[in-house]
Image (cartoon, rainbow, N blue to C red):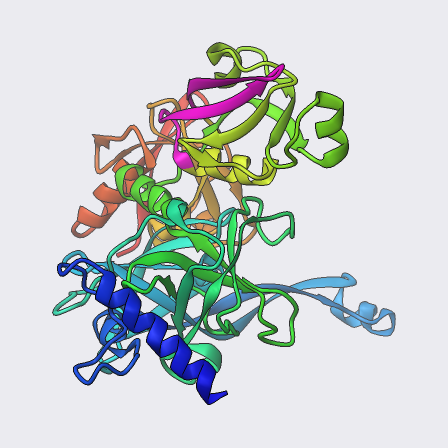
């Protein structure tokens, strides 16, 4: 065993010796001992522990013998819960923290603890359940450390990575491994799956933590493991480029404006590749192009095989769908397409998918409602949970929130901004059918 360790050290020394003098490789201390410590000392202060409290609605089945006394066979109850997870500071000045949506889902009290022991209360700025991303903001942020966001599109299988998080509530923990696979999906964990797979140990509580490269750049948000018994060497992270696109949309619009390509299809496999005369088995085969959709307008045709997006290879239809959906409505993507043996590059401007915003991120009194854009004319109220705070203040499905304190709004971002800046009473102008009314939000 010793000769292998020495061989590794010698190889690492040669690699550093041959690197340019300006390279700041993090493997070595002053005594030339291989170590990740110099890099981790700079990065770990940006990874935080998250603890949450809240109440979750559950369905309880009542035994038949007791239905006479307790009413319906199924009863809805609210039960308190507590949870732990991890997060990553991506903007020290603003106090922005990225984590998983499932870490803070239904939470009414969120506490963030730094590596140095300081604690901050946090509020939710926006969530995207389909990709399992949430953006928090710390109250009164001060002397924070942020992490540099890397480009996950440049990752290769075999690259070394480090996972940082709070497994089992033990406190900040670091594990290392390699990138085992890219573009993983089809597990049914989330609707948008384009995971980085790693053998760096990830356990319960690591969710929302950082996956970094050897230069300390964030290249993924740890989100899931395979199996329920704990780490078995197969963990998954949301790519940093996907996360950054979603966060940018939340900050700009107050919601995720999901991009739509307008195609249906499936993964390219060996049987299909042989039928098409292709010598490759990775890509997204287009079986149908939606009429007048983005792809149709750009010239994508049924039978095309999409093999790259923005010059990054696409291995499956799931990966294509995830990258398109998180690119954002209105953005342009460059697709590499194989058509009848020819390789084409086609630029497509993505249209917008109707997206819903969880209203509880705007104000506690709006909890239980979903909000969506209304073509630049206010915010439309969607489904409302029975007996929720939103229903109790008088919101109804189909309402249009047209103004806050008589200031007109055109988007969910306007609604959030005006509620956040409101002092004292907050009055919502509601358009309901042909009527107009006012609803007050409690302080």
Residue 352 on the magenta segment: no
User: Would residue 218 be visible to someone looking at this image?
Assistant: yes
Q: Observer-nearest residue: 11 or 366? A: 11
Determine the residue positioned at 66% across, 30% down: 279
Residue extent of the magenta highlight: 327-350
Q: Observer-nearest residue: 229 or 431? A: 229
Q: Residue furthest bottom?
A: 2
* Image spot of residue 227 (x, y percent): 66, 68
Determine the residue positioned at 47% across, 74% down: 205
Q: Residue furthest right?
A: 65
User: Would residue 389 be visible to someone looking at this image?
Assistant: no
135 vs 416: above or below? below
Determine the residue positioned at 34% across, 28% down: 378
Q: Observer-nearest residue: 234 or 75? A: 234
Main SS of the magenta part reads strand
* Image spot of residue 97 (x, y percent): 29, 60
* Image spot of residue 62 (x, y percent): 78, 69
Determine the residue positioned at 46% across, 51% down: 392
Residue 341 on the magenta segment: yes
Number of numbered discs visible in the structure rendering: 0
- Asked if residue 61 lies left or right of residue 190, the reply is right
343 vs 110: above or below? above
* Image spot of residue 408 (x, y percent): 24, 29
């Amino acid at each position: 065993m010793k000769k292998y360790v020495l061989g590794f050290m010698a190889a690492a020394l040669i690699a550093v010796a041959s690197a340019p003098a300006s390279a700041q490789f993090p493997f070595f201390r002053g005594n030339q001992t291989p170590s990740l410590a110099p890099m981790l000392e700079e990065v770990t202060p940006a990874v935080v522990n998250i603890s949450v409290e809240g109440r979750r609605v559950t369905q309880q089945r009542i035994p038949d013998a007791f239905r006479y006394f307790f009413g319906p066979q199924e009863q809805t109850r609210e039960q308190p819960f507590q949870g732990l997870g991890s997060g990553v500071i991506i903007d020290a000045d603003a106090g922005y923290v990225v984590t998983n949506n499932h870490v803070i889902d239904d939470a009414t009290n969120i506490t963030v603890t730094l590596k140095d022991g300081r604690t901050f209360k946090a509020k939710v700025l926006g969530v995207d359940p389909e990709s399992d991303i949430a953006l928090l903001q710390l109250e009164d942020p001060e002397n924070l450390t942020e992490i540099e966001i890397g480009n996950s599109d440049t990752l290769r299988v075999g690259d070394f990575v480090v996972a940082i998080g709070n497994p089992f509530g033990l406190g900040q923990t670091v594990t290392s491994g390699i990138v085992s696979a890219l573009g993983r999906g089809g597990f049914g964990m989330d609707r948008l799956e384009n995971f980085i797979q790693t053998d760096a140990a990830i356990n319960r509580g690591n969710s929302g933590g950082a996956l970094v490269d050897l230069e300390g750049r964030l290249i993924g948000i740890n989100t899931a493991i395979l199996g329920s018994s704990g780490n078995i060497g197969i963990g998954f992270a949301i790519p940093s480029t996907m996360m950054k696109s979603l966060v940018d949309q939340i900050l700009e619009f107050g919601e995720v404006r999901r991009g739509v390509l307008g195609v249906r299809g499936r993964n390219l496999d060996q049987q299909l590749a042989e039928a098409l005369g292709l010598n490759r088995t990775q890509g997204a085969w287009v079986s149908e192009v939606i009429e007048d959709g983005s792809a149709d307008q750009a010239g994508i045709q049924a039978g095309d095989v999409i093999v790259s997006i923005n010059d990054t290879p696409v291995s499956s239809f799931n990966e294509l769908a995830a990258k398109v959906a998180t690119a954002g409505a209105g953005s342009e993507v460059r697709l590499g397409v194989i058509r009848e043996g020819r390789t084409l590059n086609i630029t497509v401007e993505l249209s917008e998918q109707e997206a819903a915003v969880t209203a509880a991120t705007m104000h506690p009194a709006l909890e239980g409602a979903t909000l969506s854009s209304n073509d630049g004319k206010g915010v439309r109220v969607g489904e409302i949970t029975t007996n929720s705070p939103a229903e109790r203040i008088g919101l109804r499905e189909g309402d249009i929130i047209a103004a806050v304190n008589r200031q007109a709004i055109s988007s969910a971002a306007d609604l959030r901004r005006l509620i956040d800046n409101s002092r004292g009473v907050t009055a919502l102008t509601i358009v309901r059918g042909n009527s107009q009314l006012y609803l007050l939000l409690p302080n």
